[in-house]
Amino acid sequence: MREPSSGPDVHTSSPGHRIRQSGMGQRGRLDPFVETRKPKEHSCCPHCGATVHQGRWSWHQALERAAALTCPACRRIAERLPAGELKLSGPFLAEHHDEVMQLLLHNEQRYRSEHPLERLMWIESNDLSGATVIAFSGHHITRGLAQRLQDAYGGCLSGDNVPPGSMLQLHWHR
């Protein structure tokens, strides 16, 4: 039996070529947005401008003749399939909505500047319930911003860990 690991599995398919795999979820499905091979060096996403630098997506300047390759975050956005959702609700949110959103947007910009594939995708507000749902392209940003919100304002943060390939759903209420 294999020990669980905290990072992606790395397998070698041929001499000198590495394939990355994200791992299977409980239902045996892989996350379709996790790249199984390193993207071609210096590729540039035509939608957001992120580039591949040393095997990772970054915000480095694109080369003039960079190959066009849509990054996983832009693919998620185009297909409207978030990796995580954070639902906000409660009387505190109703009274301090603008302040809460400013905190989240400011921290999202800081997060995105360091992690190009971790982005806010959209925000939906429900006027009837007063709840706001924020969709993200990655699990890390979803958890990170939820924790930042709880650290700043308290409240109750709930949600479960999910296997790779599943959408993380967190709920903050105050």
Image: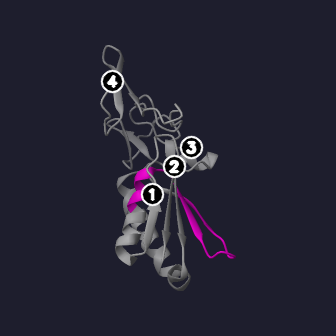
Three-letter code for the amino acid on which mark 4 is drawn: Met
Give, as a three-letter code, the residue at label 3: Arg
Crowding around mark 3 (Cα neighbors within 10 Å: few <14, some 14 to 19, many 20+) is some
Residue 75 picture quarter: top right
- Which of the pair 92/96 is nearer the observer? 92
**Residue 140 highlighted magenta (yes or no):** yes
Q: Which residues are magenta?
A: 121-144
Q: Residue at x 36, y 40 (%)?
A: 56
Residue 1: mark: 4
> How far is disc 3 from disc 1 in space, using C-alphas?
18 Å
Queried whether the magenta region covers residue 167, the answer comes back as no
Q: Which mark is residue 41?
A: none
Q: Nearer the viewer, mark 4 or mark 3?
A: 4
Q: Are marks 2 and 1 in contact (CB under 8 Å)?
A: yes
Q: Which residue is mark 1?
A: 142
Nearer the viewer's eye, disc 2 or disc 3? 2
Residue 130 versus residue 99: which sits nearer the camera? 130
| Extreme residue in the top direction | 15
Q: Earlier in the sequence, mark 4 or mark 1?
A: 4
Numbered disc in front, either 4 or 1: 4
- Cα distance between the residues tagged 2 and 3: 12 Å
Element marked by disc 4: loop
Q: Earlier in the sequence, mark 2 or mark 1?
A: 2
